[in-house]
Image (cartoon, rainbow, N blue to C red):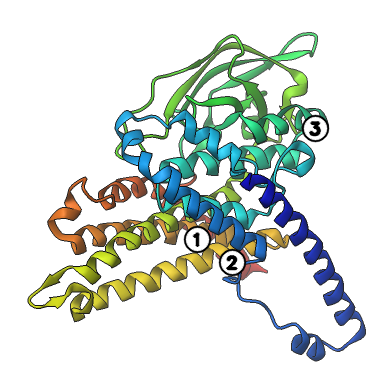
Amino acid sequence: MISIAIRRFARKAKHDSIKGASGLSTAVSTGSRDEFAKAAPPMPVTLLTDDERMIQDSVRKWANHDLKPLVREMEKNELISPSIIQELYTQGYMSLEIPEKYGGVGMNFTSACITIQEISRIDPSIALMVDVHNTLVVNAIRFWASEFLQDKYLPKLATDSVSAFCLSETNAGSDAFSMSTTAKLSSDGSHYVINGTKSWITSAREAALLLVFCNADPSKGYKGITAFLVDTNLPGVQIGKPESKLGLKASSTCQIFFDDVKVDADHVLGEVGQGYKYCIEILNEGRIGIAAQQIGIAKGCLDVVMPYLNEREQFGQKLLNMPALQQQYAQAATELHAAEVMMLNSCRLKENGLPFVKEAAMTKLFASQVAEKISSQSIEWLGGIGYTTDMIVEKFYRDCKVGSIYEGSSNIQRQTIAKIMNSELEQ
């Protein structure tokens, strides 16, 4: 089982990182700053650890061998094959950051983003399920859920239960905290009753567990927002029909209706009234995952188009050697490299407990622009055949467009960046 191999690499990497950290600490405490700098120069963010390279290779092989043959069929059916979902669990891709004691792989955030990126090179619809599950729901439970909720749900999320993140509503998109879904505490304090409708929910059709944001005290405005873990089999939970979308067609996007849904009071995630904080914090890192998806899409385009340019000849020479095209694909590769470096840097900042919100916003903003540009150019470079479904690039073009919309639109990212820049001036 590849998932077992992943666990072994994760344990070794954790041991090595502890040894390395101890050694660096000793160098700092016993030597001068200059000596430390000479002994341990900063490592490039593009240099992956052994387990990160292992997961990258594992996902790449699986995606090309097992996922690729089903991509068009799943898009046509607008349904993720159950066998693919099972494989995601078998390979360990749905439990990347879940601790081993809960049946997970216990790897780092960078590994999760690498997984999302590699799957996106083949099918961004599948990567989206992996992204939301790992970077939003699982991590929210890891960070803020009680021990009772972690014991109850993390083993399920590691083995067979898909999850969904329920924030947006029809009239609460970018202004998410204007939500109208409510959670009313019962008179005896034993449970809450949830009423309302959530919209644009990724993986709603497949989900067994929902992370739902509701207002438990509308009189307090956004400070009444509270997060709940809700099983989809509870009475009153109804999944709407999937939206008909431009891209990511295999990924289900549905409304979810809550009609007098009773949720035990001990299923509140974290503290009552702190949901808005949890939401902001988890979306900040989730945006890095979306950037990874967009980078994977752009790489997937070049995976297709570069061999074609090397094979196709016009006017007696390969397209690859035409100066006009060289200018274009060299620029595309440069921008793609920059986006990937930004993504990896954001991952490392987060993992080291350093501020990363501005960098995450920049990364998502830029990566979505790069993916849209490269996928569009790739169609042009392929010519007429690029405009047909004979080539997967047209699907990538459709799939990437939502990258500038979900988990914070591009304008929201710019606003976030500007606010932080302004605050830095005041310091």
Give the residue number, with chain letter if any, for mark 1: 363
Circles 2 and 3 in contact, beta carbons < 8 Å? no
Task: Give above or below for 340 relative to 266.
Answer: below
Circle 2 crowding by C-alpha within 10 Å: few under 14, some 14–19, many from 20: many
Q: Quadrant of the C terminus?
A: bottom right
Circles 3 and 1 in contact, beta carbons < 8 Å? no
**Which mark is on residue 396?**
none
- How far apart are the two marked residues, 2 and 3, measured between alpha carbons? 31 Å
**Which mark is on residue 146?**
3
Q: In the displayed structure, does residue 47 sit left or right of residue 9?
A: left
Name the residue rendered at 56%, 48% in the picture.
Answer: 286
Q: Nearer the viewer, residue 404 or 130?
A: 130
**Which mark is on residue 345?**
2
Q: Element under label 3?
A: loop
Dot 2 or dot 3, earlier in sequence = 3
Q: Position of residue 344 (x, y in %)?
A: 57, 64
In this rendering, the count of numbered labels is 3
Mark 2 or mark 1, which is nearer to you? 2
- Residue 420 in sight: no
Q: Position of residue 144 (x, y in %)?
A: 75, 38
- Residue 124 in sight: yes
Q: In the displayed structure, does residue 125 sit left or right of residue 162?
A: left
Q: Nearer the viewer, residue 308 or 201?
A: 308
Mark 2: which amino acid? Asn
Mark 3: which amino acid? Ser
Write down the quadrant of residue 164 in the picture. Answer: top right
